[in-house]
Image (spheres, rainbow, N blue to C red):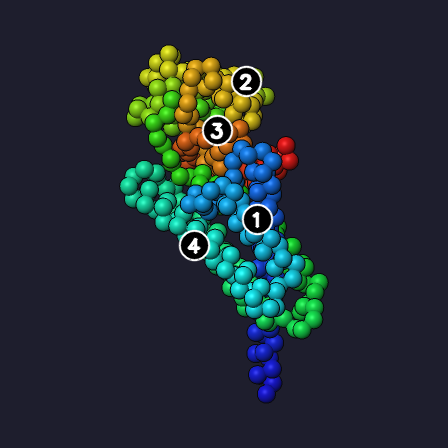
């Protein structure tokens, strides 16, 4: 009898933990989708949700309504899991609908990789992770509330703590997941110009391993015929060396003609490089643009260009010579969220 009671308590504890975890994840995803939808309504620049779910089958207003419905459903579930069968079915249905579209995204990515259109650096697309999360959230909405007592919830303080930990974990994994899944994928395609984002230059005027790797990638694209122009963008760091000039000299030494290089010595930040590139593109009549940087920067770079209404073709540079990317990835987490919220707020 005691064993049966103990097993019942263990099942209750497991159900509570799963539901608390899902409520935290639902809150995070619901807030992100809602903020992205509000940004689209106010600025109309681009839809950040399109990164993980492709709703292009529907007109933009329909897409926006569906995304807002998903956000509301997730936030309501995070606040209080529904008990009535009808509400549980609606919440689950919305999650499964979006999971299906995210899976369709995943299949499309694998088809493009099989065709050789893109080169997957990481074997799992970001949309696959989102699809699995939505399926889990659908399951939690349909069955999770059935494990709760009639009033309140088990372990109320622990429920809040668990949900908060899930939100914090999501805030870390979301940009890292995009860095690995999107950032490592090479979308190379013919463009009018490729901008290479700067990095540290050595005091003796030679590029650091990170900077050399980025320029090498740009040279590779130039030699392969993907672009006739390379835009070298960098600033002057504490070393007192013009990164853009170092990049130009390095490329010329490796056979790129000076006439194929445009210098931007005012690329002191990722934002500056994006703005300067758009100005250069306008001056020279460039319509399509490629971007090269280390993989952990690519998602943020894509977001910055899209916020200005310009899409870019991203190609990550090799980072083996840079050493472990852990420090850069950790630094990228607050950087990615800073630019996301900055774009949403402004």
In terms of secondary structure, where does tag 4 sit? helix
* Residue 162 position (above or below residue 45): below
In this figure, which residue is indicated by the disc labeled 2?
266
Q: Is residue 80 left or right of residue 64?
A: right
In terms of secondary structure, where does tag 3 sit? loop
How far apart marks 1 and 2 lie (CA) works out to 40 Å
Q: Residue 202 carries which label?
A: none
Q: Where is residue 153 in the image (x, y as percent from the top left)?
A: 67, 68
- 2 or 3: tag closer to the N-terminus: 2
In this figure, which residue is indicated by the disc labeled 4?
100
Disc 1 and disc 3 in contact, CB within 8 angstroms: no
How far apart marks 2 and 3 lie (CA) works out to 20 Å
Task: Characterize the local packing of mark 1: few (<14), some (14-19) or many (20 or more) Cα atoms within 10 angstroms.
Answer: some
In this orientation, does residue 314 appear? yes
Q: For residue 223, what is the image quadrant? A: top left
Q: For residue 193, what is the image quadrant? A: top left
Q: Which mark is residue 310?
A: 3
- 4 or 2: tag closer to the N-terminus: 4
How far apart marks 1 and 4 lie (CA) works out to 17 Å
In terms of secondary structure, where does tag 2 sit? loop
Name the residue rendered at 54%, 23% in the picture: 275
- 1 or 2: tag closer to the N-terminus: 1
Task: Characterize the local packing of mark 4: few (<14), some (14-19) or many (20 or more) Cα atoms within 10 angstroms.
Answer: some
Name the residue rendered at 60%, 68% in the picture: 84
């Amino acid at each position: 009898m005691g064993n049966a009671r103990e097993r019942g308590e263990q099942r209750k504890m497991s159900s509570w933990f799963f539901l608390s975890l899902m409520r935290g994840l639902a809150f995070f995803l619901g807030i992100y989708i809602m903020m992205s939808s509000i940004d689209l309504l106010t600025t109309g620049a681009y839809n950040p949700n399109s990164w993980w779910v492709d709703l292009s089958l529907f007109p933009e207003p329909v897409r926006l309504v569906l995304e807002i419905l998903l956000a509301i459903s997730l936030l309501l579930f995070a606040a209080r899991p529904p008990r009535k069968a009808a509400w549980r079915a609606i919440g689950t249905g919305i999650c499964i609908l979006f999971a299906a579209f995210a899976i369709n995204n995943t299949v499309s990515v694998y088809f493009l990789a099989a065709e050789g259109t893109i080169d997957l650096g990481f074997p799992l697309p970001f949309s696959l992770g989102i699809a699995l999360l939505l399926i889990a959230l659908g399951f939690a909405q349909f069955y999770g509330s059935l494990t709760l007592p009639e009033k309140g919830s088990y372990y109320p303080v622990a429920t809040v703590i668990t949900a908060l930990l899930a939100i914090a974990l999501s805030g870390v994994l979301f940009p890292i997941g995009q860095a690995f899944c999107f950032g490592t994928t090479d979308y190379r395609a013919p463009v009018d110009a490729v901008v290479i984002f700067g990095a540290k230059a050595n005091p003796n005027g030679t590029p650091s391993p990170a900077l050399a790797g980025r320029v090498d990638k740009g040279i590779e694209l130039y030699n392969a015929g993907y672009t006739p122009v390379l835009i070298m963008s960098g600033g002057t760091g504490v070393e007192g060396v013009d990164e853009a000039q170092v990049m130009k000299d390095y490329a010329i030494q490796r056979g790129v003609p000076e006439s194929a290089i445009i210098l931007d010595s005012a690329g002191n930040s990722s934002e500056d490089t994006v703005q300067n590139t758009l100005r250069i593109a306008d001056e020279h009549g460039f319509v399509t643009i490629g971007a090269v940087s280390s993989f952990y920067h690519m998602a943020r770079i894509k977001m910055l260009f899209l916020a200005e209404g310009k899409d870019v073709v991203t190609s990550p540079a090799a980072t083996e010579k840079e050493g472990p990317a852990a420090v850069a990835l950790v630094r990228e987490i607050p950087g990615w969220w800073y630019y996301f919220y900055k774009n949403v707020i402004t």
